[in-house]
Amino acid sequence: MATISQSSPRSPAETKPEVVPVQRAPSVLELIGNTPMLEVRKVTAGMLRPGVRVFAKLEGFNPGGSVKDRPARKMVEVGLERGELRPGKVIIDSTSGNTGIALAMVGAVLGYPVELVMASNVSRERKKIIEAFGAKPIFSDPMEGSDGAIRVCRRIIEENPERYFKPDQYNNEANSLAHLETTGPEVWRQTSGRITHFVAGIGTGGTIMGTGRYLKLRNPGVKLIAVEPDDPMHGLEGLKHMASSIVPGIYHEELLDAKMQVSTEDAYEMVYALGQVEGVLVGQSAGAAMVAALRVARTLKEGCVVTVFPDFGDKYLSTNLWIGWQQWRRERLQKIVGKWNASTSVTT
Ligand SMILES: Cc1ncc(COP(=O)(O)O)c(C=O)c1O
């Protein structure tokens, strides 16, 4: 009787040598980062010159489900190193959701209680996930957005300063440092140093500042383009409209080469397109990042544009993004692309 090792291969895949090592980790914290990069080819088909490519880092592959796992781990690590976080303390922060989820996960792993202040209109899924990781949500006025959450959080800490460790993602350089140490080198490696433009949405600014700084160190010619909503009353969870917001301390606009404003409507159209054409279901801030990346890519003769999709879309299924949505067709994407500045159009 043939043993398993003597039997003939059942599929071509079985004839190939094993190239992907089995990933094993002693803690979920060690599975943060090293996210895959997708070449966005189908949504961009027919819209770019032949020498232009667009890639997206799929940050939804992080164990907490978003790009925010990176700064959350780093800010807690630095807090522990400095003795600002020690047994008996509670981790608290104001967060639009993803940082909260990430901090809740890190707190669960390390055994620290976590309390999170957020506007009460963040998606139901996010609130549930935070609670599932054992953290306590505290809700602020939805009309005041993320700035309202910042103010409530400040008040809570003022009442009992010794009780809390506040990572303070808006003003903690460890936030950008996480991206300088991980996202930047990954992007550089994954593009073999060919990246020409880095496009990312701004919430705290950590992603674009840290990744951008690393990329400029490797090649000062890399252009950094930040993406923000075009309206203070936008529907792009995770992103900040800078002119009407408290500007984060870690956000240094002088590092940027350009800033692009994206409408909620265009970002939503792009989310639908990415799901149905590319097969990637993402959140609305990824839609905005992709709109900007495509707009940049369409101005180029040659180039390698990299953007970041901060998370996947399942957390947003109960939000306005999907309310009223019924049927989407590719022509709708062509329509929004058509309305962008005619001088940036590329015909193929
Ligand atoms: C969904 C989403 N997209 C984008 C961002 C922006 O990232 P950063 O804070 O690094 O600017 C955030 C930040 O919270 C986010 O939650």
Image: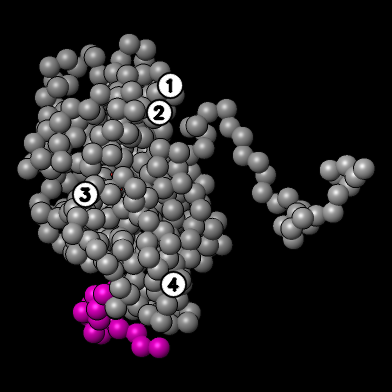
Q: Which residue is mark 2?
A: 106
Q: In the picture shown, does residue 279 fall above or below 204?
A: below
Type of the residue with mark 3? Thr
Specify the principal SS of the magenta part: helix
Which amino acid, by three-letter code, is at mark 1? Leu
The image shows residue 205, relative to residue 56, as above or below, that is above
Measured in 3D between alpha carbons, the distance from the residue under mark 1 to the one under mark 4, in whole angstroms, is 42 Å
Circle 4 residues within 10 Å: few <14, some 14–19, many ≥20: few
Closer to the N terminus: mark 3 or mark 2? 2
The location of residue 106, given as percent across then percent down, is: 40, 28
Q: Give, as a three-letter code, the residue at label 2.
A: Val
Q: Are marks 1 and 2 in contact (CB under 8 Å)?
A: yes
- Provide residue 345's location: percent of width, then percent of height: 30, 83
Residue at disc 2, secondary structure:
helix
**For discs 2 and 4, the disc positioned in front in the rendered view:** 4
- Quadrant placement of the N terminus: top right
* Range of magenta residues: 332-348
* Mark 2 surroundings: few (<14), some (14-19) or many (≥20) residues within 10 A: many
SS state under label 1? helix
Q: Residue 329 at x, y = what percent? A: 30, 73
Q: Where does label 1 land, which residue?
A: 110
Can you tell which of label 3 and label 1 is closer to the viewer? 3
Q: Is residue 117 magenta?
A: no
Q: Secondary structure at mark 4?
A: loop
Residue 130: x %, y % from top left: 30, 31
The residue lying at 28 percent from left, 39 percent from top is: 125
Question: Within the image, what quadrant is residue 135 found in?
Answer: top left
Q: Which residue is mark 4?
A: 42
Give the number of the mark in front: 3 or 4: 3
Type of the residue with mark 4: Lys
Q: What residue is shown with label 3?
A: 319
- Give the CA separation, mark 1 to mark 2: 6 Å
